[in-house]
Image (cartoon, helix red, strand yellow):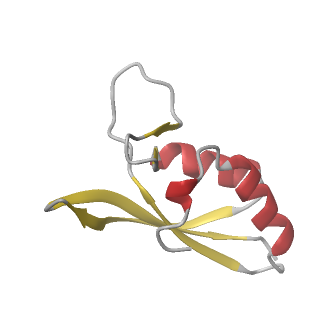
Amino acid sequence: CADTFIYFGDLAPLARAFAFALAPGGHLVFSAEERPAQPGRAPGYDLLPSGRYHHDRAYAEAVSRDAGLEVAAVEAITVRTENGVPLPGFVMTVVRPA
């Protein structure tokens, strides 16, 4: 799911749906815009003026694990360039245990 999760705020229902739909040993690879760290702010996501969401990496990992998925890999990326500015993000691979 490349550049798709930016249209969803709460990723927990998506993670549960993918955990149900994936075959044992199945993989999901998705990208997300990364929410900048701010001291004292709870992990999660925010709706941006663009109408897209950005997510904390730790939040995406937590909802995946809570859904019963294993986080296999996370890599920092530039998800796209918008108005000449590169937007930081990540690609995460999760696996439904066999």
State the residue at coordinates (38%, 50%): 34
State the image coordinates of residue 6 (x, y, percent, origin top left). Answer: 50, 56
State the residue at coordinates (72%, 57%): 14
State the image coordinates of residue 30 (x, y, percent, origin top left). Answer: 54, 69
In the rendered image, which quarter is residue 9 located in?
Answer: top right
In the rendered image, which quarter is residue 37 located in?
Answer: top left
State the image coordinates of residue 5 (x, y, percent, origin top left). Answer: 55, 60
State the residue at coordinates (53%, 36%): 44
Residue placed most toward the observer, 67 or 35: 35
Q: Is residue 8 left or right of residue 92?
A: right
Q: Is residue 24 left or right of residue 37?
A: right
55 to 25, vertically: above or below? above
Q: Quadrant of the C terminus?
A: bottom right
Residue placed most toward the observer, 25 or 60: 60
State the residue at coordinates (67%, 55%): 64
State the image coordinates of residue 94 (x, y, percent, origin top left). Answer: 62, 68
Residue placed most toward the observer, 72 or 3: 3
Residue placed most toward the observer, 5 or 48: 48
12 to 16, vertically: above or below? above
Q: Is residue 85 left or right of residue 78?
A: left
In the rendered image, which quarter is residue 48 located in?
Answer: top left
Q: How many marks?
A: 0
Q: Quadrant of the N terminus?
A: bottom right
In the displayed orientation, state which residue is furthest to the top: 40
93 to 60, vertically: above or below? below
